[in-house]
Image: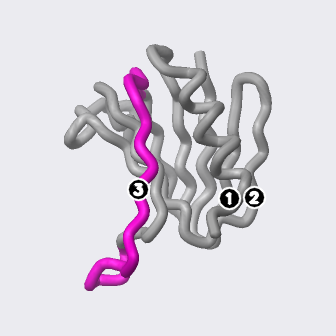
Amino acid sequence: MMNPSIDEVTHWLQSKSNQTLHISKQEEKDQDQIKIQLERIEHQQHQEQSIDGYGDRHALLLHGPGVVITEGHEAPLPSDAFVIGLDGLTAADIQDHQVVLTTDRSTYSITAT
């Protein structure tokens, strides 16, 4: 069964279509900054994890042109999509202009501008 807060997060993201989202992904000691012009979102579900164990069975795909910002440099977002892995989702805090998702691997802070 899908975590009910995923529906709320999906609805929030859909309401931000055609806006710029700033995403901060914290995973262990690694932090990524992403800026994306959201065009559409997609919820993916797979029955099995990938062979390397890294792919999530549940994920939200944010489609749109964007950039990855590292140490002040910007690089194009690969494949014009950003994946938010939802396996192990433990919390979803939804505010007017921000959503914070916490999984057992990462914390995603998504802010609409």
99 left or right of 28 in image = right
Label annotation for residue 102? 1
Residue at position x 20%, y 41% from top?
79
Taking depth in this image into account, of 87 and 71 the one nearest to the observer is: 87
- The mark closer to the camera, 2 or 3, is 3
* Amino acid on which the number 1 mark rests in the picture: Thr
Q: Callout 2: few (<14), some (14-19), or many (20+) C-alpha neighbours within 10 Å?
A: some
Q: Which residue is mark 3?
A: 44
Taking depth in this image into account, of 28 and 6 the one nearest to the observer is: 6
Disc with the residue nearer the chain's start (2 vs 3):
3
Instruction: Residue 50: tell me if it is visible.
Output: yes
Where disc 1 sits, the SS reads strand
Label annotation for residue 91? 2
Residue 80 picture location, percent across and down: 25, 35
- Magenta region, residue range: 36-54
Residue at position x 47%, y 39% from top?
33
Q: Callout 1: few (<14), some (14-19), or many (20+) C-alpha neighbours within 10 Å?
A: some
Is residue 48 a member of the stretch shown in magenta?
Answer: yes
Residue at position x 57%, y 32% from top?
13
Disc with the residue nearer the chain's start (2 vs 1):
2
Q: Work out whether 25 lies above or below 81.
A: below
Is the C-beta separation of discs 2 and 1 under 8 Å? Answer: yes
**Image quarter hosting the N terminus:** bottom right
